[in-house]
């Protein structure tokens, strides 16, 4: 079977995606953004880091998959392999004592 390219497919490598520090020890790599404002990103948090302020989910929800380490939303720990759906209008304070890597998806802009 011959595999051909699919129209509209987009891809990138995390290692080749530009990194931007958003807070000390917290970096984001934007992997993809869609026409309706949807986005996919990787967030890297060093050990003992915390978001500055409250992360509010507006206008849409946030989907989080913990790739490695342990993520804490200000209420509980989520180990690697955890999936979190944060609905529109919710908020939390992202932090990690161990450090973690997260895959983030925002289905709405």
Image (tube, rainbow, N blue to C red):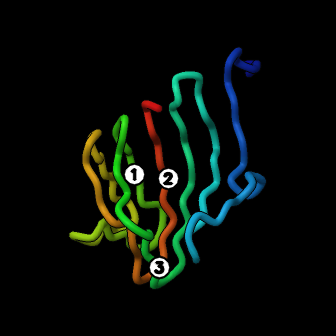
Asked if the residue under mark 1 is in contact with the one under mark 2, i.e. CB atoms within 8 Å, the reply is: yes
Sequence-wise, the earlier of marks 3 and 2 is 3
| Residue 6, above or below 109 | above
Residue furthest to the left: 75
Q: Secondary structure at mark 3?
A: strand
Residue furthest to the front: 53
> In the rendering, which numbered label is found on residue 27?
none
Q: For the N terminus, which image quadrant?
A: top right
> In the rendering, which numbered label is found on residue 103?
2
CA distance separating discs 1 and 3:
18 Å
Q: Secondary structure at mark 2?
A: strand
Q: Residue at x 75, y 54 (%)?
A: 18
Q: Is residue 24 left or right of residue 56?
A: right
Sequence-wise, the earlier of marks 2 and 1 is 1
| Residue 84, above or below 35 | below
> In the rendering, which numbered label is found on residue 64?
1
């Amino acid at each position: 079977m011959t595999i051909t390219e699919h129209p509209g497919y987009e891809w990138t490598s995390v290692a080749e995606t530009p990194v931007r520090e958003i807070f000390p020890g917290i970096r984001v790599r934007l992997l993809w953004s869609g026409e309706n404002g949807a986005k996919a990103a990787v967030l890297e948090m060093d050990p003992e880091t915390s978001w500055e302020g409250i992360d509010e989910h507006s206008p849409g929800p946030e989907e989080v998959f913990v790739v490695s380490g342990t993520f804490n939303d200000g209420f509980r720990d989520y180990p690697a392999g955890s999936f979190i759906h944060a609905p529109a209008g919710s908020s939390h304070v992202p932090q990690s004592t161990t450090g973690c890597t997260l895959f983030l998806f925002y289905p709405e802009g």
